[in-house]
Image (cartoon, rainbow, N blue to C red):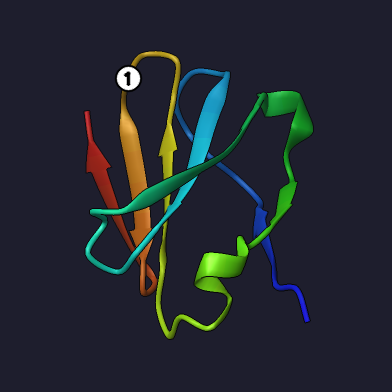
């Protein structure tokens, strides 16, 4: 059964590129690009991560700032 991920809010400059990564944020899969007007943004978790116990969502804005959310903790790199 597919798992949907919903991005309900994001800061930074649109457009945004969203990735799903392993729990170490080493291996990442590009999902799509979205704009502020498309929030909430929903996507299906890739098959590779369907059975994972943990994964990260990484978002990179148009200025190159990165926000990563892993296990309920948000990390900002800008």
Q: Nearer the viewer, residue 34 or 74?
A: 34
When the figure is inspected, residue 78 is found, relative to residue 22, above or below; the finding is above
Q: Secondary structure at mark 1?
A: loop
In the displayed structure, does residue 43 sit left or right of residue 56? right
How many other residues sit within 10 Å of disc 1, few (<14), some (14-19) or many (≥20)? some
When the figure is inspected, residue 55 is found, relative to residue 17, above or below; the finding is below
Q: Report which quarter residue 6 is drawn in.
A: bottom right
Query: Quadrant where the C terminus lies?
Result: top left
Q: Nearer the viewer, residue 30 or 14?
A: 30
In the displayed structure, does residue 26 sit left or right of residue 57? left
Give the farthest residue toward the top. Answer: 63
Figure disc tally: 1
Residue 30, image x and y in percent?
A: 50, 40
Residue 47, image x and y in percent?
A: 61, 67
Q: Report which quarter residue 71 is drawn in.
A: bottom left
When the figure is inspected, residue 39 is found, relative to residue 8, above or below; the finding is above
Residue 43, image x and y in percent?
A: 71, 52
User: Which residue is denoted by mark 1 in the rendering?
Assistant: 64
Query: Quadrant where the N terminus lies?
Result: bottom right
Residue 28, image x and y in percent?
A: 38, 49
> What residue is drawn where x is 35% and y is 42%?
67
């Amino acid at each position: 059964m597919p798992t949907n991920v919903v991005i309900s809010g994001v800061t930074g400059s649109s457009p945004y590129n969203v990735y799903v990564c392993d729990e170490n944020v080493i291996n990442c899969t590009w999902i799509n690009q979205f704009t502020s007007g498309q929030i909430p943004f929903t996507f299906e978790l890739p098959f590779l991560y369907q059975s994972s116990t943990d994964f990260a969502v990484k978002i990179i804005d148009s200025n190159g700032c990165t926000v990563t959310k892993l296990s309920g903790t948000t990390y900002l790199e800008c």
